[in-house]
Amino acid sequence: MLEFVFIQHPLFKPMRRYLLLRSYQSVLILKPDIEESRVDEALAKIGEFIKSNGGAILKTEKWGKKRLAYRVKKNRFGVYLNLYHTLEPSGVFDLEKKYKLFDLIIKFMVLHLADDELERALGRDEESDEAEGEKAAGEKAAGEKATAKNDEDKG
Amino acid sequence: MAETKKRSFFSSKICRFCNDDESKVYIDFHDIKALKPLISERGKIVPSRISGNCAKCQRLLTRAIKKARNIALLPFSVQH
């Protein structure tokens, strides 16, 4: 069943659109100096935001603490979260407003995903995780080798 | 002859994204390892003339880099 809704947006006149669920990706940067338990709390709260706009979270990724390429609100580091979720198109503006008001989030980006992009994103998880794990292990081994070499040089 | 010499000086004229197969190309904005080599020291996007990417991939790449810049994964500019 398709229904008509009026999309409320301050920049555009009300438009008549079909009410459908579309898939989105939200990338959020949280404050760097918070504990992991607070990250989970924030995730729960963000889940409520999305639910209140008629969507559901499909997948969450924690990219962890990363160095930012430039300062954001005087922070040099940030905790990255990546969410794949559905949403009513009329709720995007509301969701962005809630992100803006949520004090733990220092920067965010909401992207609309095409179907093939979403499929790829959801299918990617296990393989990439494994690959990353292997890579990390490889890097660790390389690092150990390097340190060992350094020790030899010193010795 | 001169042209080929010049070309070999930079890099081979092979698109590094769609070279292998003809399936649809995806360039993720969060895949920084793939994007980093295509950015100059100043943070500018390297032109396809130099990197050798095909026009279609260069367009996708540009979009990916701009998204990455927006979410602070890549710099807008590097200060000296």
Image (tube, rainbow, N blue to C red):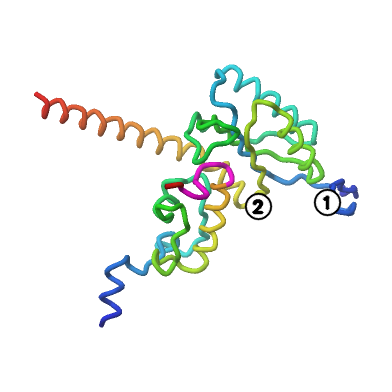
Q: Badge 2 sits on which subunit?
A: A
Q: Which residue is located at x 61 percent, y 38 percent?
A: A27
The residue labelled by disc 2 is A114
Q: Which-is-in-front pick, marks 2 and 1? A: 1
Where is residue A40 drawn, in percent x and y? 61, 21
Instruction: State which tag comes first along the sequence, 2 or 1.
Output: 1
Q: Position of residue A94 (x, y in %)?
A: 79, 38
Magenta residue check for A32: no
* The image quarter in which residue A137 lies: top left
Is residue B76 covered in magenta?
Answer: yes
Q: Is residue B80 left or right of residue A102?
A: left
Pick the front one: A150 or A39: A150
Residue A60, relative to residue B70: is it above or below? above
Which numbered dot is residue A43? none
Circle 2 packing at 10 Å, graded few (<14), some (14-19), many (20+), is few
Q: Which residues are magenta?
A: B70-78
> What secondary structure is the magenta-colored segment mainly?
loop
Q: Which mark is residue A11?
A: 1
